[in-house]
Image (cartoon, coloured by chain):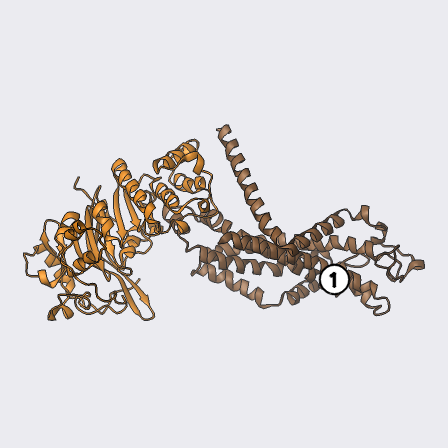
Amino acid sequence: MTDTILVVDKLKKYFPTKRGTVKAVDNISFSVTTGETIGLVGESGSGKTTTAQCVIGIYPPTDGEILFKGQTISEAFSKRSKALKRDIRIVFQDPGSSLNPKRSIKQILSVPLKVHRVATKKDHLTKIKSLLAMVELPPDEYMYKYPQAIGGGEKQMVAIARALATDPSLVLLDEPTSALDVSVQGKIINLLMKLQQDLNLTYLFITHDLSLMRNVASRVAIMYLGKLCEIAPTVEFFQNPTHPYTKMLLSAIPVVSQEEKALKPTKIASRGEIPSPVNVPSGCSFHSRCSEKMDMCAQDDPVMVEIGEGHVTRCHLYQDTKVAASIEQEEGVHAQDPVDQPRGDG
Amino acid sequence: MREQLRTDLLVSLKQKRRGFAKGWYKFSRNLLSVLGLVVLILIVLAALLAPYITPYPEHAKPYTNFKDAGKPPSTEHFFGTDRVGRDIFSRVIFGYRFSLTIGVVVLSLGVAPGVILGLIAGYHKGTWIETVIMRITDIFLAVPPLVLALAITAMLTPNLTNQMMAIALVWWPWYSRLVFALASSLRNEYFVREAELTGASKLHIMLKEILPNCLAPVMTKMTLDMGIVILLGATLSFIGLGVQPPKPGLGTMVAEGSKRLPGEWWGAIFPALAIVVVILAFNLVGDGLRDVFAVEEV
């Protein structure tokens, strides 16, 4: 069960703009194991969606590599093979705009079946019905409806059914619940978890909702201004957060009961807003908001260090801990790149 | 399998009917549009049945009766008679045949290529394909349609067929511009992106994903354009580059009648009014349709 399905290796995605280069994703590395749910969490503009878009191929990366099942897929989707398109699928945030309003649900679901020849033409209908049943929508009732005639949660179910129609192994969930009512969110999440079990899916779950990750993810990765701050197994992440940004985010989760409050780490007030990605602060990009800022933070960008089993953090507070040699070496090479001179562009 | 196809068909028919009923309800809220539709239906019926309902159907053909020439409107000749004694009312009804033919033929010739080119250009926004198609479109749009149609008709023999071809040739760019604008924004919608990521063909994306979302504005524009095309046709006929006398083109009749203004005013005024009425009817219907589609999109 420990095969790695996806490796993102020093991925960079820069967007040239009139005001300067936006480093949407700046040198991030992580890997995803088959069958797990990795939560990619960050504020708006932290680059989490861009990361997913690089994986699915909407943007080819500026630099770095993406490996899927051991093969490099660092190219735009138009150059990808059909088999690859079939194996990696995406569910977008807003089901209102990801379903064509002029096409019935039956027509929408038949597209992946036709393109990938999932079923013979005769079996299309059976397959569509079983897909709808899979996402707990009564097939005969919903098949002929148009997206505008059904609710937001139901639309997202259809979008999930469409993503799963090709029997993928990796599904990117780009904030699949944040456009929905809270009452529907739970239903969608439960469905996703059930489907993951049944179909042995791997999820790259992008969200800004940290508390959701506690129940859903097996590992959580925090992004800030295009860089990863901390990756940790979920339990470790919530019990023993190390990066000041993680601590800040965790203490910002609203709680109701005393028990919940007891679970939270030391209280750190959230300060300021995420800076513009065009003008990233020098050194550690988080130093402008950090509660434990030191002098060196404004000059040197810290490197990723492993401080526990699968627990990686990027902060000067932990730089002198026992460092995994391989990580330091790799990162050390990169750290010599001048930060303010982007290499290449998109 | 056959059973299923039948239920498919039945359900989609039922839904179409429901959609139509909803659309009609919205349309009927606008009384002026309903009035326009009624007038339009009357005009179309009259034009279709012209030989049976007009009092003097033979007056649409070469015919002279100088005894009755230049008579003012009366119960016998509703719109009076022209300088060779033909009943103007009968000729106006027959004239609608030409006008409607021009509208229908020009739009069916011009809209399809315009829509297809706009779709291709819009989907390929930012590439050389867009540049080529849209610059050609711009060149056509830069020349006023009347002037271009004039030039083309003048080069060819002036008759109805050539006139229609000329107008169609200047009409498609408006549709390619309209559909280009729609398609180039639709191509960024997530449902198009999803289809691309699934691996659907370009043809599928353009025809099945983008085009259905362009049809409402195109249909509205077609209704509004019918009036304008009819006016352009009448204008060309007026200056002698369209329907040739003795055929009863509305523009041709205005031209003939205008020589005898202001004395025999009925010769020019009634055909001119007929043009106004049909254009107004199309515009009212077009406005109503626009409201129907606009509300639907919200």
Q: Work out whether B281 lies above or below A85.
A: below
Place of residue A181 in the rendered image (x, y in percent of width and height, measured from the top left): 35, 49
Q: Work out whether A137 lies above or below A56.
A: above
Determine the colour of chain B. Answer: brown
Q: Secondary structure at mark 1?
A: helix
Is residue A343 at all visible to an observer of this figure?
yes
The residue that disc 1 covers is B237
Q: Nearer the viewer, residue A204 or A65?
A: A204
The quadrant in which the N terminus of chain A is found is top left
Q: Work out whether A51 lies above or below B3.
A: below
> Residue visible at 50% across and 35% down?
B8
Place of residue B164 in the rendered image (x, y in percent of width and height, measured from the top left): 68, 57
Q: Is residue B251 left or right of residue B298?
A: right
Q: Nearer the viewer, residue A324 or B113?
A: A324
Q: Is residue A204 left or right of residue B234?
A: left
Q: Residue A245's quadrant in the figure?
A: bottom left
Q: Which chain is orange?
A: A
Q: Residues within 10 Å of mark 1 (few under 14, many from 20)?
A: many
The quadrant in which the C terminus of chain A is found is bottom left
Place of residue A289 in the rendered image (x, y in percent of width and height, measured from the top left): 19, 66
Place of residue B122 in the rendered image (x, y in percent of width and height, measured from the top left): 47, 57
Looking at the picture, which amino acid does disc 1 mark? Ser
Q: Residue A329's quadrant in the figure?
A: bottom left
